[in-house]
Amino acid sequence: MRLGFLNPLFERPGPWATVYVDTSHPHQSSAEDHERSAREACRRLEQQGADARTCRAVYDELATVTPATEPVGRAVFASRGEVVLDPSLTAPPQSAPKACWSALPHVGPLVELTGDDPSCLVAYISRTGADFELRGAHGDRAVGQAHRTATADWPERRFQLRTENTWEHNAGLIADELRTRQEQTQADLVLLVGDARERHAVHERLPEQLRGRAAETAHGGRAAGSASPGTHAARLLDHDVDEVRARHVHGHTEEAMERFRAGRVPMEGRVTAAEGVPGLVDAAREHRIGTLLIRPDGTDLYRDVWAGAEPDQVAMRRSDLQYLGDARPVAVRADDALIRSAAATGAEVLTVPPGGGADDTNGAPVGGLGALLRWPYEGGAAQ
């Protein structure tokens, strides 16, 4: 999970109101229940010291959040009378509503509740071209076409058709256009839709690096109505997209865990992974964190650290931050401080599944927090 979308939260001072609201039970939620939930969230914020303007902004935002607008839930982050960010959730929070007032936005739960939602570039292929659609965390949108027109022109390309190799030529042009669209959208995955021969031909002509991230499906197609919303074919295609994403997330997480298990063991005096709050605080201060690993049930997530105004101003002791130049450090949760640092430096964050899969017996981070480092420690680990 890339955290660039969280940067608006870290570009302005706090304190922050954070609310996670569950809308996953529409049959149990009346208008009165919804309004009562919004009032309860604001009451909890007030009890923790939130100002009236910010509480009102949160209430007004929560009033718009219903099962009809958000089938699962939403997070709301507000400061100084303004809602700054309100991302949708892909999993419901454990308590509804979960509200807190803190020096940093409470983004820890967001990693688990939004999950790793890789974007998928879907290519609907036919013999005469392709339509491209990007599916991701922020919805689905068309991202262009590649087709043979009456003048045989594409943007900056031209079909030079010959009778004997029309389709082979088109397949190469579609593959080239698909590569361009993937680079433009930064899609994590590619799914080829269409007739088996057509999608195979495009698949074979993709660059090697992109070919390894491409999958195929026979469900749906480019013909009018072949994957219209609500049809059986559309549902099958949606299932295939979800399956491709899930396989990608699982494989990516397992690969990261293998690297973590190997990296925290010194090899020729070099350690490429860190775990435990003190070690991660040092790594964050030095911008070493490349991938932050978080197990939601880990006890270290709740530990207090000291944070300053800048993302790399984080320490175990208040006096350390004062030495680093921040005269007014604040105590914050370790997960919130480390996620802020990861977002500021472009690091990735991965959730390690709790209570199974990659738990402690499989070498998960001690205490629930670990990292793969951008460059190693020489001569031993930071613990």
Image (tube, rainbow, N blue to C red):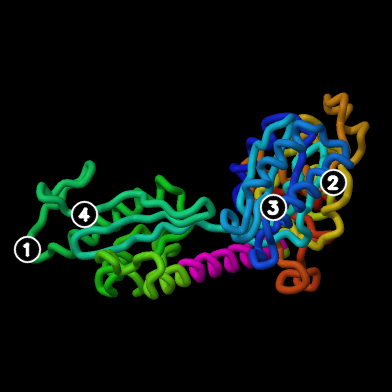
Q: Which residues are magenta?
A: 241-260
Q: Nearer the viewer, mark 1 or mark 4?
A: 4
Which dot marks residue 147?
4
Q: According to the image, label 2 marks what residue? A: 44
Task: Give the total of numbered labels.
Answer: 4
The kind of residue tagged 4 is: His
Tell me whether circle 4 and circle 2 mark residues in contact (CB < 8 Å).
Answer: no
Q: Residue furthest front?
A: 32
Residue highlighted by disc 1: 163
Q: Residue at x 78, y 39 (%)?
A: 104
Tell me which label, 2 or 3, sits earlier in the chain: 2
**Rounded to the nearest whole Å, what is the CA distance between mark 4 and mark 2?**
56 Å
Closest to the camera, between mark 2 and mark 1, is 2
Residue 249 covered by magenta stretch: yes
Q: Amino acid at mark 1?
A: Thr
Please tell me whether residue 321 is drawn above or below residue 122 in the rendered image. above
**Camera-side mark, 3 or 1:** 3
Indicate the position of residue 191 as horizontal and vertical percent values.
Answer: 40, 64
Q: CA distance from mark 2 to mark 3?
A: 19 Å
